[in-house]
Image (cartoon, grey):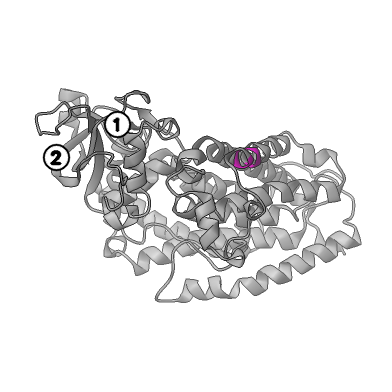
Amino acid sequence: MEWFSSPGYWLGRLIFQRGLAALYLVAFVGAALQFRALIGERGMLPVPRYLALMPWRQAPTLFRAYYSDRFFASVAWGGAAVSAALVAGLADRVPLWAAMALWVVPWVLYLSIVNVGQTWYAFGWESLLLEVGFLAVFLGNERVAPPVLVLVLLRWVLFRIEFGAGMIKMRGDECWRKLTCLYYHHETQPMPGPLSWFFHRLPRPLHRVEAGANHVTQLVVPVFLFTPQPIATGAACLMILTQLWLVLSGNFSWLNWLTIVLAVTAVDFSLLREPPHLAAAPLWYECVVIAVTALVVALSYRPARNLLSRRQSMNRSYDSLHLVNAYGAFGSVGRIRHEIVIEGTADPVPREESSWLVYEFRGKPGDPGRWPRQFAPYHLRLDWLMWFAALSPMYAESWFGGLIERLLTGDRDTLRLLRRSPFPADAPPTYVRARLYRYRFTTWRELRATGACWERTYVREFLRPTRLAASRIQNW
């Protein structure tokens, strides 16, 4: 069928597939390096305990058959190996059916991880990676032209990402309607980057321009993804530029990069380079793509209705396979930044004048003089959850006590998640406490005088001095 294929998008497909495989690689490496302390057999939220409570249909995963930390590591590193092979172009060196099978592997493996990841994996970009990864299975390789139906489905994902984020903003915090949210966002976002201080210090009229441009890019531009070329290419390029702006201004894991590679699939590179001759798609492949398209269209009902709902959900999955999801970001923007600072002491009796030493995290603000680092697309899961815990203790009910317990026991896997522990694993502290501080970016004058990008003020006690009792830590 001539209408089935679109050779002009072969280069966009190539860039998309390599980029998606690279993000899969980052996700698997992050899972392999962080899982033991978070969800391992002795982690804060152990996988075996979770699977014992969760019905199979709500959490399909390979770990239903068997779980051990060694097996989890094998799954994560195996996924990383397959992803690296896809980055290197292995899928273009094998028959079409084998290429599709190769793309199924990282999707199944990462689905198995996400479905046991609990709160550590409850982020919109996890579902986004799985949804896009599922569609990538049916995009073909260099032996066939890209199928039009899958390209349209990828644009549908991109539309929901952008339009969903735009609508949640307009329905949420009034500062988006007043164009004032960017007065605060760069300072209060979950994990600022090395340029966030400078973005925050832009003149306020420019912040209003930022907010207005955001509304245009998320509420108007996505509609043009479904128009003829070169208009759709122009819309995709505007989205790419907006996402690069977000990459520079903060650390949002692979959300921005995955949105960028998605937008590339809407760019018609035939305007710049003549596409090569590609064989016609086999009949079995056309039938599979049509069936998958029908499935996605049917599953899109609830996400589409969610876009139009006054009670719009943000970052929600409607099925346990994460095939079609709802997305959104920053429906509300904090005006004040709070951070939890965890300290320990070796003194037998904790006093205010005791020698309290600070645990330093890799990404979240701690030492006011330490400039934020760039970590995205790598995802520091503990650092992100610490940001949520500072918003409200209810976000930490399930895991914070486990974190404190592991610091008190000198758990090596937990200490590896930190930038610096003031206590060696074989000599843990006697007591640990947590304190809440208000953080704000310094002014230009303060920066020149002190060299510090943050200024902080003590707010209150978050966790009183706690020791490892025989009964362990139950209600922190």
Task: Identify the residue under disc 1.
Answer: 359
Instruction: Measure how far apart labels 1 and 2 are at the Cα level.
Output: 18 Å
Q: Find out whether residue 74 is within the magenta segment.
A: yes
Above or below residue 370? Residue 376 is below
At label 1, the amino acid type is: Tyr
Q: Secondary structure at mark 2?
A: strand
In the foreground, 338 or 345: 345
On the question of residue 320 being in view, the answer is: yes
Task: Identify the residue under disc 2.
Answer: 457
Q: Residues within 10 Å of mark 2 (few under 14, many from 20)?
A: few
- The quarter of the displayed image where residue 31 is located: top right
In percent of width and height, residue 352 lies at 10, 34
In percent of width and height, residue 475 lies at 28, 53
Answer left or right for 189 relative to 461. right
Q: Find out whether residue 344 is within the magenta segment.
A: no
In percent of width and height, residue 257 lies at 54, 44
* Magenta region, residue range: 71-75
At label 2, the amino acid type is: Thr
